[in-house]
Structures are given as C-alpha cells and as structure tokens.
C-alpha cells in the first residue's frame, strides 16, 4: 500500500514537474513566436523599403536614359553644326580667294598706270601732280599687300599653301630682303644693319619665296613700328642645331597685355594702330604658319616703348 502511495507521489511529482516544464517550454515558444512575428514584420518592412528603392532606381534609370538620349541628340546636333560651320568657313575662304583675285588684276593695272605717270612716260608732271600720283601709288601698294595677305591666309585655311623646298642658304634671301627695304628705311631715317657670321651658314631645306615673305614681313614691321632715328639690326647665327635669325628694333614694342595675340589673324595692337595706320594684322599669322611648315619656330620678346626682337629658328636638315 505504501509503495502505491510512494509511486503515486512520484507520478504526481512527475506530472507536476512535466506540467511546470511544459509551461516553461510553452512560454519560451510563445516568446519565440512573438519574436518571429516581430522579424516577419521587420522583413515585410524591409521588403517594402526594397520595393520602394527599386521603384526609385527604375525612375532614376528612366531619367538617366532620357538624359543619355538628350546627350546623344545634342552630340548629333553639335556634329552637324560643326560640319556646317566648316562648310561655311570653306565657302568664306573660297569667296575671299575669288574676290581677292578679281581685285588684284585691276589693281595691278592701276599700279602700272601710276608708275608710267611717275616715270614721265606720258609727259612730265609738276611737283603737285607728282605728289598726288605718289600717294595714289603708295595706297595701291598697300591694297596689293592687303590682297596678297588675304590670299595667303585663304590658301593656308584651305590647305592650299603649297611649299617648294630646296637645299638653300638663308644668306642671299636675307640680303634680298635687306635690299628690298633699304630705301624705305633710309627714307624714314632708320638705320638698317645686317650682321652675318664670318663662316658660311649651312644649307637648309627652304622654300625661298615663302621664307622671303617672312623676312620681308619682319623687316617691314620693324620699319613700320620704329620711329625715325631708330635702329634695326638683322642678325643670322648658327646655334647648335639651328640657324637663328633675329630682327631687333628700337621701336614702339607690343603692350604687355596684348603680347599673346600677336600671331592671331587680323590682330593689330592699340599702339600700332596709332603709330601706323596701314596694316592688315595678317603678316605675322602668315609668317608663323610658313615658319611652322619649315619645322621652325617664330617667337619674339618686346618691351613697350623700347623695342622688339622677332626670332626665327630653323632646324638643320639632319634635325628633321
Ligand atoms: P600688320 O599688318 O598690322 O603689321 P602683322 O601681322 O605683321 O600685321 O603684325 C601684327 C601686329 O603685331 C601689328 O599690328 C603690331 O601691333 C604688332 N607688331 C608686329 N611687329 C612689331 C614690331 N616690330 N614692333 C611692334 N609691334 C609689332
């Protein structure tokens, strides 16, 4: 009987223990379920956020696609505009060429007529008549110079500025330029000095006519922009792998703030326009291009009111 009571007590204790245990387990399960619900909620929220972010991304992607399309369209438009500008530029160069050619022929006629009048071929002129014809001739020369500059510029822009290179010395071309300008310099009261090295200068690959244009232009400028009583020194030297030509003057110089524009088309410095009314602003642009075609450099140093030195550096043949 006692053993029944003991067994019954043990069983009861077991049942109580099992009850307590299952209660604990149930509590834990409930806790876990609660946590699960929380996680599910969190997951749902994250999913919603992800869906939202996805939507925004899609929107942005649409927008960037639109921007890309606009960019491609703009690129096309720019290419077309560029092409049109190039065509217009070429039409402009062609127009300048044709117009300049048409102008040059009658001007050459006028030049010969005025020259004939001056040399007395059709009778002698009195002092006043001579002065009128001389002024007319000077203006005609200026016009011819402008037309030649315009033609050279148009040829450069159309890529038709042909070169004819030969192995030559710079010295005779230089001497010819000095001869061309000796009278003009003397008339203006300017000393024009040529300094050549004692030893012969080496032969260079040159286009004599084109280099002549450069030298004439530099000497012409030096005379134009130097006041009477000034001095111009033209110097050629051999320096390492280059023949260097310098045209140094004691003229008006180039204003510091305009120095960077000197080789651009149609540029004329303020002081130059005041000192000398004639000028196209094309000579140095053309000269720069010619020197570059010789694989050389054209540079200058200048001090306003004191003078300028223009320097052409031409490479020896084996340096090409
Ligand atoms: P321009 O026909 O006006 O002389 P250039 O192209 O030969 O045209 O020269 C451009 C400008 O550079 C000139 O108008 C002048 O302002 C300046 N310049 C050129 N050479 C000299 C110089 N030796 N002294 C001072 N300024 C110069």
Image (cartoon, grey):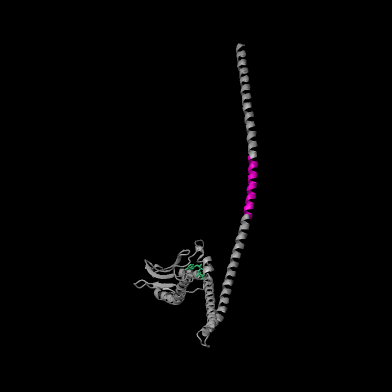
Residue 77 x %, y %: 62, 62
**Between 12 and 198, which is closer to the camera in this rendering?**
198
Q: Based on the picture, tell me whether residue 260 belongs to the magenta stretch.
A: no
Residue under the point 63% across and 45% down: 53
Give above or below for 42 relative to 317: above
Q: Based on the picture, tell me whether residue 55 belongs to the magenta stretch.
A: yes
Residue under the point 64% across and 47% down: 56
Residue 167 x %, y %: 40, 74
Residue 6 x %, y %: 60, 14
Give above or below for 90 relative to 71: below
Image quadrant in which you'd find residue 178 = bottom left
Q: Which residues are magenta?
A: 46-66
Residue 15 x %, y %: 63, 20
Residue under the point 61% across and 59% down: 72
**Quarter holding the N terminus?**
top right
Image quadrant in which you'd find residue 176 = bottom left
Residue under the point 38% across and 69% down: 237
Q: How many marks?
A: 0
């Amino acid at each position: 009987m006692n053993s029944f009571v003991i067994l019954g007590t043990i069983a009861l204790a077991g049942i109580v223990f099992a009850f307590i245990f299952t209660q604990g387990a149930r509590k834990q399960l409930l806790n876990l379920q609660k946590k699960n619900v929380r996680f599910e909620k969190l997951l749902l929220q994250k999913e919603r956020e992800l869906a939202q972010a996805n939507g925004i991304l899609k929107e942005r992607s649409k927008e960037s696609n639109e921007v890309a399309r606009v960019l491609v369209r703009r690129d096309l438009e720019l290419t077309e505009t560029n092409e049109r500008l190039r065509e217009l530029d070429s039409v402009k160069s062609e127009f300048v060429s044709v117009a300049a050619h048409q102008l040059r022929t009658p001007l050459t006629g006028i030049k010969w007529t005025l020259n004939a009048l001056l040399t007395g071929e059709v009778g002698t002129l009195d002092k006043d008549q001579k002065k009128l014809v001389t002024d007319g001739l000077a203006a005609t020369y200026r016009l011819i110079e402008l037309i030649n500059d315009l033609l050279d510029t148009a040829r450069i822009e159309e890529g038709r500025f042909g070169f004819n290179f030969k192995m030559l010395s710079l010295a005779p071309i230089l001497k010819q330029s000095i001869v061309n300008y000796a009278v003009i310099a003397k008339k203006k009261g300017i000393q024009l000095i040529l300094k050549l090295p004692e030893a012969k200068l080496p032969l260079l690959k040159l286009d004599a006519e084109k280099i002549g244009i450069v030298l004439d232009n530099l000497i012409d400028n030096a005379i134009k922009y130097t006041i009477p009583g000034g001095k111009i020194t033209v110097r050629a030297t051999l320096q390492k792998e280059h023949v260097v030509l310098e045209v140094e003057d004691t003229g008006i110089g180039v204003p510091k703030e305009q120095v960077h524009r000197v080789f651009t088309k149609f540029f004329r410095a303020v002081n130059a326009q005041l000192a000398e009314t004639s000028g196209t602003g094309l000579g140095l642009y053309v000269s720069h291009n010619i020197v570059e075609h010789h694989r050389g450099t054209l540079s200058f140093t200048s001090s306003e009111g004191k003078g300028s030195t223009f320097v052409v550096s031409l490479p020896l043949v084996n340096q090409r």
